[in-house]
Image (cartoon, rainbow, N blue to C red):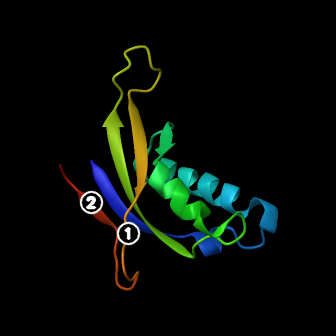
Amino acid sequence: MAVEATINLHKLVHGTTFKYRARKAIRRIKTFAKKMMHTHDVRIDPKLNKFVWSGGVKGIPFRARLRLDRKRSDDEEAKKSLYTVVSWVPVADYKKLITQKIEE
């Protein structure tokens, strides 16, 4: 199962010291994914990481369109059988975008 959602990073890191803004944005994306997909193991795609860090440590983007994919773990010894992969979806404009479930 997959979900596409828009997250307002500007609101989530408001009041954070400039030195920690990008790091905190990544942490907040992970907590958002945990709540949406109900998994403890959340993995960030390198393209999303580059997008968040594109403006440096303090110049993060205001919003990001995310694709959250819940997958089954191949490792039989894993404690939890599911994990979430969070990837970035490039969009031209964030207006009138809604959260969508994508069945595969």
Mark closer to the chain start, 2 or 1: 1
Q: Residue 62 carries which label?
A: none
Q: What element carries label 1?
A: loop
Q: Is mark 2 on a helix, strand or loop?
A: strand
Q: Residue furthest top?
A: 77
Could you tell me the amino acid type at mark 2? Answer: Lys
Residue 84, compared with residue 21, is above or below; it is above
* Callout 2 crowding tier (Cα within 10 Å): few <14, some 14–19, many ≥20: few
* Callout 1 crowding tier (Cα within 10 Å): few <14, some 14–19, many ≥20: few
Q: Which residue appears at 49% of the width and 36% of the height?
A: 41
> Is 53 displayed left or right of 99 in the figure?
right
Q: How far apart are marks 2 and 1 (CA)?
A: 17 Å
Q: Name the residue under label 1.
A: 90
The quarter holding residue 88 reads: bottom left
Q: Name the residue under label 2.
A: 101
Q: Which residue lies furthest to the left in this view?
A: 104
Q: Position of residue 67 (x, y in %)?
A: 37, 57
Q: Which residue appears at 80% of the width and 62% of the height?
A: 19
